[in-house]
Amino acid sequence: MQSPLNYIKDYISKGHERSRNIKKNILLSFLIKGGSIVITFLIVPLTLGYLGARDYGIWLTLSSVISWFGFFDIGLGNGLRNRFAEALAKGDKLLARIYVSTTYFGLAGIFGILWILFFGASFFLNWNSIFNIPAGETGNMQTLVVYVFSLFVLRFILKLISIIITADQKPAISNTFDPLSNVISLIIIYVLTLTTKGSLMYLAMAVTFSPVFVLLIATIYFFRNNYKEYRPSLKYFRMNQLKDLTGLGFQFFIIQIAVLVIFSTDNMIITQVLGPEHVTPYNIAFKYFHSVSMAFAIIMNPLWSAYTQAYTINDIPWIRHITTRLVRLWFLIVALVVLMILISGPFYMFWIGDKIEIPLLITILMGVFILISTWNNIYVYFINGAGKIRFQLYTSILAALANIPLSVYFAGSLEMGAAGVILATCICLLPGTLLAPYQYKKILNKTATGIWDK
């Protein structure tokens, strides 16, 4: 009888070279992300105990609001991911380096200007009112917000090394960065719980410093070794290539803005409509199911660039084969999500004790949200990799326009609370469950025309 280790080795060694590379990266990513999930589950009760429910809700809202500014890269990150993969597929190393250099310096310029504008505006904004907290209760919010934003800007620029590694179809390597950051954060937060009273500023310093440190070390290392020939240099910055990157990238940018409205405004809506303390149960349910979406993302992550390569060389049979296997996997995810809903009560009690009550409706709707988003991603990742995103652009805008008023109506007017915000998101994502598979089939069958083929 074959040992499990030999079975895994045989499984990885079978199939197309592209498939073998994907399977190897998925396996390594699962091992890495498995540790990351454990660390995340440890951080939540530790942070909750350190700050308390209300301040923890404020921190979640602040970090989500700051992350909104990541979408001001006008799609350069995703543009680089596609163009770099295309250049590697064609063996054009010079063009690949031009894309890397143009993205780094272009992004640094954009976020440099954005930081100056944000810093100036921060003095005129009432941050306590924005986060719905009484004046003076959490210290100087302006200092806290500017600090978090500054570290976020550095993190966003440094994170380009992760995009380059992923575009080179080695996502297992880039997947190590977040777990390493989380380990450092976990250690610092634990020390804080022993040596200080609950402080948003101390927590912000711990959580925002760690990823910047890890990504800085990774950037220096990889551009001195594996990606030395693609190292960014001002000599290779090309304004015309910036237009090429943002041509495709600008459509990604608009889609990202729509995704921002659909996914990332929930914490702010809950804070304003219900209060920051209501963010905590919502976020705990989200983190509970996030392990499922993270596992699925591990599988999907290497496929984006692999789809780009396969579509570029017209390897349609391989694309169909991968999609069929993903659909089968999705039905297993359905069973897993149902099981997680059934055992959620005992698990919450084990995880966070009786500090916070998580309504069952929030858990059920969060599970439905995970199922809808994972199903859509089966097809959206191929569409993104192929660069045929015009239709997705329009549908994302419509969904974004509907999301906020629906969220406020369900949460406030219908008094559904945080569950209403999740329900609104699910409704906005539903059209994609039919439209994304339809476009996928039209592209592969060579019948896509007009908006379906742009």
Image (cartoon, rainbow, N blue to C red):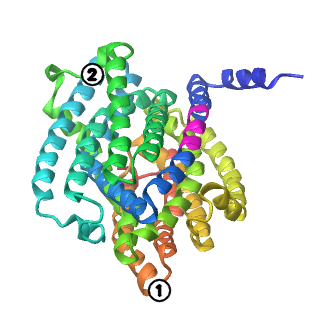
Q: Give the residue displayed 35% in from the left and 66% down from the top.
A: 268
Q: In front of the other: label 2 or label 1? A: 1
Q: Is residue 142 above or below residue 304?
A: below
Q: Main secondary structure of the magenta part?
A: helix
- Looking at the image, residue 217 sits to the left or right of residue 314; the answer is left
Callout 1 amino acid: Leu
Q: Nearer the viewer, residue 384 or 133?
A: 133
Mark 2 element type? helix
Say the numbered circle drawn on residue 92.
none
Q: Nearer the viewer, residue 358 or 86?
A: 358
Q: Residues within 10 Å of mark 1 (few under 14, many from 20)?
A: few
From the top left corner, tell me how far across and down residue 382 is, in percent.
48, 44
Q: Is residue 35 magenta?
A: yes
Instruction: Identify the residue position indicated by label 1 in the image.
Output: 414
How many labels, in total?
2
Magenta range = 31-39
Q: Give the residue displayed 58% in from the left and 36% down from the top.
A: 35
Q: Give the residue displayed 66% in from the left and 25% down from the top.
A: 15
From the top left corner, tell me how far across and down residue 390 is, in percent.
34, 54
Quadrant of the frame with the N terminus: top right
Instruction: Identify the residue position indicated by label 2 in the image.
Output: 97
From the top left corner, tell me how far across and down residue 418 is, in percent.
48, 73
How far apart are labels 2 and 1 at the CA level?
A: 54 Å
Asked if residue 92 shows in the view, the reply is: no
